[in-house]
Image (cartoon, rainbow, N blue to C red):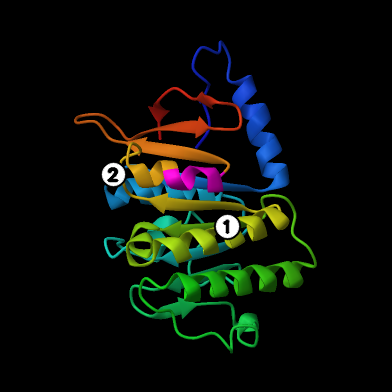
């Protein structure tokens, strides 16, 4: 996901990777933008969820164009894993570890485009994995939401409030979360949401070319060059 990335004007990518390692240690929340097909969002999600086996992954499915939860997970990870928690608001379903049944017993069924239900369940899932592991290592927890757009359309104010809580919780356990927003990076809502996140990953696919990405890092006031996703 980050191999070959470098800030504009830098001779090497060392500055970017030093910052990235710091981000992994302290916890991070990344906004993923770009009006791209579902297959490209899925490819980005697979990279961001990480390929290590010792990961705890929480996936929230909101956007109705998503093909399947499995398309978001890297090789050797699946919906059936005990390390995976899936919230599917599209179909009112969830897939959780059997050991989490008690922790999730008070939760309502997932409700379409409902940020309140989503926030509560993600908090529950994070709490379950943190307790199960007796504390999480940096970057061990991965959270993915695809996409924020239906939630914002329904209740922008509530979505922003709950995102502030979720991003703080993710940082509190040194986790890594990615939040897809499938709109052009130039849209006003992107600028509004950017302060809630540590960085922004912009995706694009030009005709005849492979998908590309670049990172915007407000903390450093820099943007990387475009490279293949």
- Check disc 1 and report the residue beneath it: 164
Residue at image coords 64%, 67%? 126
Q: Where is residue 118 in the image (x, y as percent from the top left)?
A: 49, 71
Q: What stretch is highlighted in magenta?
A: 192-197
Q: Position of residue 52 (x, y in %)?
A: 61, 51
**Residue ranking furthest to the left:** 207
| Residue 15 makes an appearance in the image | yes
Which image quadrant for residue 130?
A: bottom right
Residue at image coords 44%, 46%? 192
Which is more foreground, mark 2 or mark 1? 1
Is 111 left or right of 37, judged from the image as shown?
Answer: right
| Residue 54 makes an appearance in the image | no
Residue 182 versus residue 94 in the image, above or below: above
Q: Main secondary structure of the magenta part?
A: helix
Residue 173 painted magenta? no
How packed is label 1: few (under 14 Cα within 10 Å), some, or many (20 or more)? some
Q: Along the line of sight, which residue is nearer the eye, 21 or 73?
A: 21
- Check disc 2 and report the residue beneath it: 35
């Amino acid at each position: 996901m980050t191999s070959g990335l470098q800030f504009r004007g830098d001779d090497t990518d060392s500055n970017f990777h030093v910052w990235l390692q710091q981000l992994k240690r302290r916890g991070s929340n990344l906004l993923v933008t770009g009006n791209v097909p579902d297959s490209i969002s899925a490819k980005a999600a697979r990279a961001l969820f990480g390929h290590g086996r010792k990961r705890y992954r929480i996936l929230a499915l909101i956007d109705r164009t998503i093909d399947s939860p499995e398309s978001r997970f890297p090789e050797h990870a699946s919906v059936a894993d005990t390390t995976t928690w899936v919230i599917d608001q599209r179909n009112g379903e969830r897939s959780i570890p059997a050991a989490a049944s008690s922790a999730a017993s008070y939760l309502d069924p997932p409700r379409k485009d409902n940020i309140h239900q989503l926030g509560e369940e993600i908090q529950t899932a994070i709490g379950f994995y943190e307790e199960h592991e007796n504390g999480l290592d940096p970057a061990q927890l991965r959270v993915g939401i695809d996409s924020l757009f239906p939630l914002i359309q329904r209740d922008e104010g509530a979505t922003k409030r709950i995102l502030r809580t979720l991003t703080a919780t993710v940082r509190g356990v040194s986790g890594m979360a990615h939040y897809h927003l499938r709109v052009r990076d130039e849209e006003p809502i992107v600028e509004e949401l950017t302060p809630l996140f540590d960085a922004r990953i912009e995706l694009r696919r030009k005709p005849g070319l492979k998908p590309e990405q670049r990172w915007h890092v407000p903390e450093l006031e820099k943007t990387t060059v475009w490279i293949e996703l």
